[in-house]
Amino acid sequence: MQTPGCTVLKSLIVVGAFALASLPVSAQRISADAIENGHFPQALRGHLDRSPERSIHRLRSTGNQAGRSAGVTAARHTAPPRPIVSPFFFPGSRSGSVNYGFIVGPDPFSDREGASTSVKTFLVPVVIKVHQVATDFSVDANNNLILTGIKNQDATYDPTQAAPACLGKTNNVPFTLAVQSPVFQNHHWVFGGTDLGDTQYPDAIQRANFWDATDRDPGNYHLHLDTQALPPVVIDFPIGSGIGLPQSSAFLNYSACAPSVSVDFNLFDEYLNYIAIPQMASEGVNSGNFPLFIAGNVIWSDVIGELPYYEPEAAGYHDFSLVDPAQTYGVAEFGDDHVLTFPDAEVISHEVNEWINDPIGVNVVQAYNVNAEYNAVYDPTGPVYCQVNYEVGDILDGFDMPPVKGENGYTYTLQEMAFFSYFYGGPSFGVNGWYSSNNTLTSDAGPVCNLM
């Protein structure tokens, strides 16, 4: 997601067993005018996803070394992980030339009959601890949104615990609901009258995406996520790096059914890269599989050095490890606060499908306006942002599939996804000749996006 902003310099901090130095990040201060002009609560939620700025990473772990070394040593004595990605080559009509990239699963353009694969997927709950809580919002002299009533107070946000205030007496454990969602469990899918069968949502998306990609065996492409839940990762954010958000606000006139928390985006990502993921080698996590970290009502933000400003960045993201660039991973919230977070499985569906189609975010396409559909429906005078990678969720932020009732009886929110043909050019070989999974996109991205 493209985010305008400026660069600020973070001061050196020491956090527990590791140090984080000199972190330039993109500031995203929220003007109260944006909220008054009808963008509440969208402005408070931040982007649905974002990628870390890789140039900032300088963290070195000085603790937990024994555990990390043991995991790495064990991994060295096993066979190399089998690659989970395949290259693709495609003569796209938008570019007028051959395009290439990498996709999770088999090459959809090969003539191999019945192309299918299974990827081990580790689902990891994330428990967040912070030691500051804000009680309301206000604005500074420049009309930028700030947090007020900040006090030192311990707070824990644990998606493995029941959340009856928002979710009721049953089906009320966010992480359990995430695991039981149609992203990972079978559901019967029908897109525009075409029966896609019983499968997981990402598999249904890929079947529909490449329905007629090879002009043989329509709908015979498969990608299955073989899931396994792991014990929670617990991250303790020191004062100044994470803060509990107001559960209700007299200033913004809202009341949420559950508390939410804002944590520093880059500090969190550093912890995953250098501590959490290497330690999970002993659990079998490696570049031949996919760990997905699932939090509850968590917003990844600019926090370090920015308080009291509230600068939300993302509800999730997917990327590759700095320790092993072949290792991909994802992060997503499962929200239930109804105000500051996106609903239930919407972010998970976004991140998993984007990871599958563009595992590290570098599959280049002809530039397109990533705000095109959102502006057309919600904000006709909104800005144009040109984006140049094959991210199947970004173009449809704000657009969901019809509600999906899971086997557990819970009704899930899943985001609509754009198809390959939207980015690389028509005519579409997607199911029904569509360009997205709910037919919101009715043509490809068209002429190259140009801000000039």
Image (tube, grey):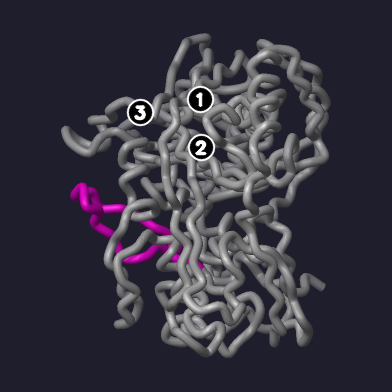
Question: Can you tell which mark lies on residue 160?
Answer: 3
Q: Amino acid at mark 3?
A: Thr
Q: Earlier in the sequence, mark 2 or mark 3?
A: 3
Circle 3: element type = loop
Q: Which residue is mark 2?
A: 293
Q: Nearer the viewer, residue 137 or 212?
A: 212
Vertical placement of 340 versus 274: above or below?
Answer: below
Disc 2 packing (10 Å; few <14; some 14–19; many ≥20): many
In the image, which residues are magenta?
399-417
**Mark nearer the N terminus (1 vs 2):** 1
Amino acid type at image mark 1: Val
Instruction: Indicate whether residue 402 is drawn in magenta.
Output: yes
> In which quadrant is the C terminus drawn?
bottom right
Q: Residue at the spot x=39%, y=54% of the render?
A: 183
- The residue indicated by pointer 1 is 233
- Where's residue 266, x and y in %? 68, 33
